[in-house]
Amino acid sequence: MTIKYECQDMFSHEIIATFDTYDEADNFMDAAYGMPDWWTTPAMTIVEVTNESHNCNLKINAALTTEQQAQIGQDFIADVAELSGRESKQKAAY
């Protein structure tokens, strides 16, 4: 029995990538969500797949909830506003 780990789109279940180990799949997701344009990355889940039964067993739901995505977006906007405010104050000081 061969076990593979698929990173799938959480909603369409489209296979995004397939790995031999869970750690590889987990590292892929960490890297994808760590990219500067993380908001373009679909919500993903890691699915354990065996070639014998062709059934997928949900291993972990690693997607961000809507609330988590909203909070990250709000934090980002607040950080940008804070940095813009600092820059304006620095320009006014000169």
Image (cartoon, rainbow, N blue to C red):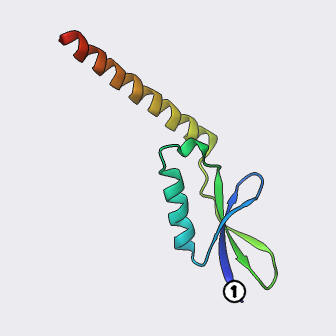
Q: Residue furthest bottom?
A: 1
Q: Residue at x 61, y 53 (%)?
A: 63
Q: Residue at x 81, y 78 (%)?
A: 54
Label 1 sits on a secondary structure element that is loop
Q: Residues within 10 Å of mark 1 (few under 14, many from 20)?
A: few
- Image position of 60 (left or right of 72): right
Number of dots carrying numbers: 1
Q: Which quarter shows the N terminus?
A: bottom right
Q: Residue at x 34, y 25 (%)?
A: 83
- Image position of 25 (left or right of 58): left
Q: Is residue 41 above or below residue 3?
A: above
- In the depicted view, which residue is nearer to us: 61 or 26? 26
Q: Which quarter shows the C terminus?
A: top left
Q: Is residue 9 above or below residue 26?
A: above
Q: Position of residue 51 (x, y in %)?
A: 76, 83
Rendered image quadrant of residue 6: bottom right
Q: Is residue 87 above or below residue 43?
A: above
- In the depicted view, which residue is nearer to us: 87 or 76? 87
Q: Position of residue 58 (x, y in %)?
A: 70, 67
Rendered image quadrant of residue 67: top right
Q: Position of residue 14 (x, y in %)?
A: 75, 59
Q: Is residue 39 above or below residue 14?
A: above
- In the depicted view, which residue is nearer to us: 85 or 57? 85
At label 1, the amino acid type is Thr
Q: Residue at x 23, y 17 (%)?
A: 90
Q: Position of residue 29 (x, y in %)?
A: 55, 59
Q: Residue furthest left?
A: 94
Rendered image quadrant of residue 59: bottom right
The residue under label 1 is 2
